[in-house]
Image (tube, rainbow, N blue to C red):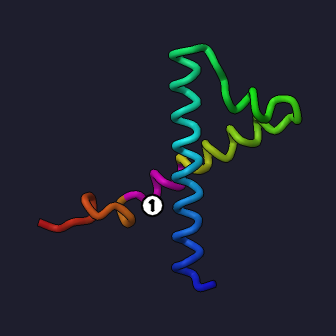
Amino acid sequence: MEGGERMKILHMVAFALLVVGGLNWGLVALFNMNLVETIFGGIGLTNIVYILVGVSAVYIAATHMGDCKVCSAKG
């Protein structure tokens, strides 16, 4: 697996975690339902999932300009 392929996989995982985090916050706000805690709370992984979502947000924010075709377009 080459470096570019690894970075693409990392980007997709980070993006997926951001979607999960965003959907979870929407569920909390609309229905007072924390899906992450429902799924992972019983086995104590909730905080790990939240940390991964936070790290993913930082990664996407830091690499967005280089990955986004709209933001990196010249002209």
* Residue 60 x/y as whole percent: 48, 54
- Outermost residue toward the bottom in this view: 2
* Residue 43 x/y as whole percent: 88, 35
The verdict on residue 62 being magenta is yes
Quadrant including the C terminus: bottom left
Taking the spot 53% from the left edge, 60% from the top edge, the residue there is 12
Image quarter of residue 38: top right
Left or right: 27 as drawn, with respect to 38: left
Residue type beneath disc 1: Thr
The verdict on residue 69 being magenta is no
Is the residue marked by circle 1 packed among few (<14), some (14-19), or many (20+) residues within 10 Å? few
Bounds of the magenta segment: 58-64
- Outermost residue toward the right in this view: 43
Give 53 or 62, whichever is nearer the viewer.
53
Mark 1: secondary structure: helix
Taking the spot 68% from the left edge, 38% from the top edge, the residue there is 50
31 vs 36: above or below: above
1 vs 43: above or below: below
Taking the spot 61% from the left edge, 14% from the top edge, the residue there is 32
- Residue named by callout 1: 63
* Residue 16 x/y as whole percent: 55, 50
